[in-house]
Amino acid sequence: MARAIQLSVDNVRMGGGPFGAVVVKDGSIIGEGANQVSTLNDPTAHAEMLAIRRACLKLGAFDLEGCEIYSSCEPCPMCLGAIYWARLSCVYFANTAADAAAIGFDDVFIYRELEQPFERRKIPMVQIMRDQAAEGFRAWKDKPDKVSY
Amino acid sequence: MARAIQLSVDNVRMGGGPFGAVVVKDGSIIGEGANQVSTLNDPTAHAEMLAIRRACLKLGAFDLEGCEIYSSCEPCPMCLGAIYWARLSCVYFANTAADAAAIGFDDVFIYRELEQPFERRKIPMVQIMRDQAAEGFRAWKDKPDKVSY
């Protein structure tokens, strides 16, 4: 966690947001990241996302089971979703989503939005063409040699 | 949406998951993606994430306000979080998260996990070193020339 916090502090000096994260396997760091949303023009470039992507690249795997992530701040819904998809075994965090909200970040707002039904969300969600889209799911279901994830 | 569905169907043939997405600005596609989790070994490489990242790259911006996203499936929490961070104006989707769960994807499970308090989640979440992490947030708050996002 000391390394994740150091990344968050250094990143502010380098023009990025105050967030750092590291993925650890068997006591060693295998991926780290600091928020690069504004420096890369990539809204998905949160510290945890970059640390996860780099750890997966290092392991040559899309699964980080048995690894832990240390983040200087409680993960936002995007990053927590990525943590579940990556099957990390434990999340350590320092600042809370409420702490992040207090300095102007949308983490708490997005958590609240996800709890709302579609029709009450600030970004409208409209379902169309479900019948046509079933074709992709059928193709997946029927594929004998698929790589599940 | 027809293009997003086509991407989802083609992607199964190419060894990826049955998901496609496009970002549209002023009636034109500016970014598209199909799920590449298993083909790139990247758990964050969902169709929507790739479409958003490519649209941002094209515009040279981390903000997609005024753009819509068409996804062949209801976005998972990770992708919906990214949609909020990118400030997209509308989400069109075809298959539902429940449809995805029915063919073996964790979307509904992850939505349920996010609603749970930390101590009831399948992946443990442990807060440590909050006092030390405040340093990064103070540095951000005190930085006069920061780029907010």
Image (cartoon, coloured by chain):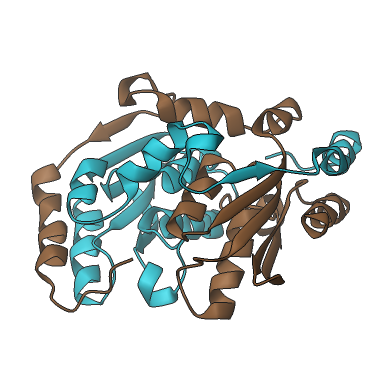
Chain colours: A brown, B cyan
Residue B113 percent coordinates (x, y): 42, 39
Quarter of the rendering containing residue B19:
bottom left
Observer-nearest of A111 and B50? A111
Quarter of the rendering containing residue B97:
top left
Q: Is residue B140 left or right of residue B2?
A: right
Observer-nearest of B116 and A4? B116
Observer-nearest of B120 and B84? B120
Who's the residue at 87% across and 43% down the image?
B132
Residue B28 percent coordinates (x, y): 35, 51
Q: Is residue B99 left or right of residue B83?
A: left
Q: Is residue B76 above or below residue A30?
A: above
Who's the residue at 46% across and 32% down the image?
B116
Who's the residue at 32% across and 51% down the image?
B106
Q: Is residue A38 above or below residue A62?
A: above
Residue B143 percent coordinates (x, y): 89, 39
Say if residue A41 shows up in the picture.
no
Quarter of the rendering containing residue A105:
top right
